[in-house]
Image (spheres, rainbow, N blue to C red):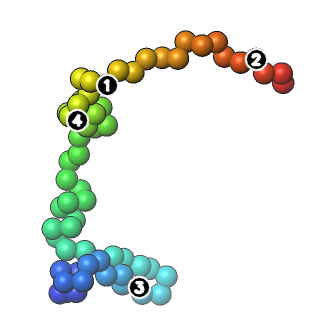
Amino acid sequence: MTRPLTEGPQRIRHRQDEVVVISAEEYERLVRERPTFKAFLMQSAGLDELHIERDRTPMREVDL
């Protein structure tokens, strides 16, 4: 049980079954609540200076 703490995740196989043992700290990091993508973008620094405009040029014609 000390290997996941000192060496990282450990794979354990038994016939066709396989599990990965990780430290509790790594597990908590993986399952903690994360902000939504929108919230992540809204809290990012420097978005006030970002100017995004839609390209208004007409679409090209395609023969099908």
N-terminal-most mark, 2 or 1? 1
- Residue at 26%, 78% in the rendered image: 8
- Residue 53, horizontal then vertical, whole percent: 43, 17
Asked whether 5 or 20 is in front, the reply is: 5
Give the residue type that dot 1 points to: Leu
Within 10 Å of disc 2 (Cα), the crowding (few <14, some 14-19, many 20+) is few
Query: For mark 3, what is the residue?
Result: 13
Question: In which quadrant of the rendered view does residue 19 lie?
Answer: bottom left
Amino acid, disc 3? Arg
Residue at the disc numbered 4: 44
First of labels 3, 2 by sequence position: 3
What residue occupies the far right of the structure in this picture?
A: 64
> Horizontal placement of 13 versus 57: left or right?
left
The image quadrant of residue 6 is bottom left
Helix, strand or loop for disc 4:
loop
Residue 1 drawn at (x, y percent): 19, 86
Hey, what amino acid is under mark 4?
Answer: Ser
Crowding at dot 4, Cα within 10 Å, few <14 / some 14-19 / many 20+, comes out as: few
The image position of residue 45, as x and y in percent, is 20, 34
Q: Secondary structure under badge 1? A: loop
* Residue 50 shown left or right of residue 44 in the figure: right
Q: In this view, does 13 lie to the left or right of 34?
A: right
- List the residue tagged with mark 2: 61
**Marks 4 & 1, CB-CB < 8 Å contact:** no
SS at mark 2 in the image: loop
Separation (CA) of disc 2 from disc 1: 31 Å
Check the image and report above or below for 52 versus 18: above
Q: Which of marks 4 and 1 is nearer the N terminus?
A: 4
* Distance Cα–Cα, label 2 vs label 4: 38 Å
Task: Judge the density around disc 3: few (<14), some (14-19), many (≥20) Cα neighbours within 10 Å.
Answer: few
